[in-house]
Image (cartoon, helix red, strand yellow):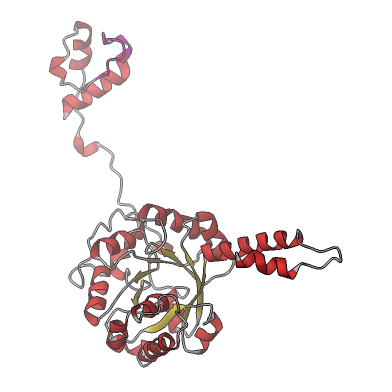
Amino acid sequence: MASLFYTTAAAATLSPKLPVGKGQPLSFVSSKSLSFPSFKPWVSSLKPLNPTKIPTLSPLKCSSDLSPSPTSSSLKSRLRDGETLYGIFLLSFSPTLAEIAAYSGYDFVVIDMEHGPGGITESLEMLRALSPTKTPAIIRLPESSEAWAKKALDLGPQGIMFPMIDSPKDAKKAVSYCRFPPDGIRGSAHAVVRASNYGINEGYLGNYMEDLLIMCQVESVDAVKKVEDIAAVDGVDCVQMGPLDLSASLGYLWDPGHKKAREMLRTAEKGVLKSNPNKGGAFLAGFAMPHDPPEELGKRGYRMVSGTVDVGLFRNAALEDVRKFKNSLMVGSDGEEDKDADEKYWSE
């Protein structure tokens, strides 16, 4: 160790005098290999450093406001207080659109890795964009697996959504992916990941589950048959309805508003509503559809309503913008729009 200190000091102080070839880097060598006569007296005069006197950094203490204790503003707390929350799905993975959504007043956003093009890296950028706005983010996984859950949770979202949960067994596995041993099987790197402020939050392991919202999606006929048992699984906070996949499982992919699809959805809703969230049950969450608007979901007992998707909003606005301009070119001499031309344009 002493020779390392000697060599480092000599190189730093006298490197201009070293006969090193141009472009040749210095390397750490022992003091015995220094054969230059002019260096020997200088090196011999150095004394080894006393390790006990080498300054060290004290353990970093976190301030109390960084401790992840339960907060009154968390989604879980607000649901328990009786609020009905309104959110938006983000499929574009655009940090700019995420910021706009947050500042618009949504109670939460869902970063959708299941159907959006982004992965873990893009989700991290979304979370960073949302952080200053204090808007809670939920990450929907591309599949319900231990590996995806671990990577998503390490980013530090306030909620996690597991797709295609068809049974209580699936739900129990999903919960286990969120909990560290011995309560679950979540892999641990808590000392360095974003969820613990890169290890600065000393209280992270003590209450990391307090504000984490675990959501399981029910979106198949088999899942609806077991929805009450899924809602009763310990650790499942919300059961999220999946109307599109549910209608597809019934054979109505192109008609999610079909009578049989609606009936199946109502059956699933009633099953979740039978559970008592204050006694181990789950809250009801879901998507709005053109035939089933957000306000209707709220009336039926949904406590988390996702009313729209970022790409859908932009698509609708873009179509309307183009339509208005095209129609302006079809205005007749009397100043009124040519309705027949408008219908022909859209029929194409």
Q: Is residue 23 magenta?
A: yes
Compared across the picture, whether 212 is left or right of 324 comes to: left
Question: Of 277 and 56, which appears nearest the observer?
Answer: 277
Q: Is residue 260 magenta?
A: no
Residue 289 seen: yes
Q: Return the x and y of residue 181 as percentages of the image width and height.
A: 19, 68
Compared across the picture, whether 133 is left or right of 59 comes to: right
Give the quadrant of residue 166: bottom left
Q: Which residues are magenta?
A: 16-26
Q: Residue at x 61, y 68 (%)?
A: 347
Q: Return the x and y of residue 107 as percentages of the image width and height.
A: 51, 72
Q: Considering only vertical position in the picture, is 95 above or below 280?
A: above
Compared across the picture, whether 96 is left or right of 220 comes to: right
Q: Residue at x 24, y 37 (%)?
A: 53
Compared across the picture, whether 347 is left or right of 117 comes to: right
Q: Residue at x 25, y 24 (%)?
A: 8
Question: Of 67 and 84, which appears nearest the observer?
Answer: 84
* Image quarter of the C terminus: bottom right
* Image quarter of the N terminus: top left
User: What is the residue that sits farthest to the left in this orientation?
Assistant: 32
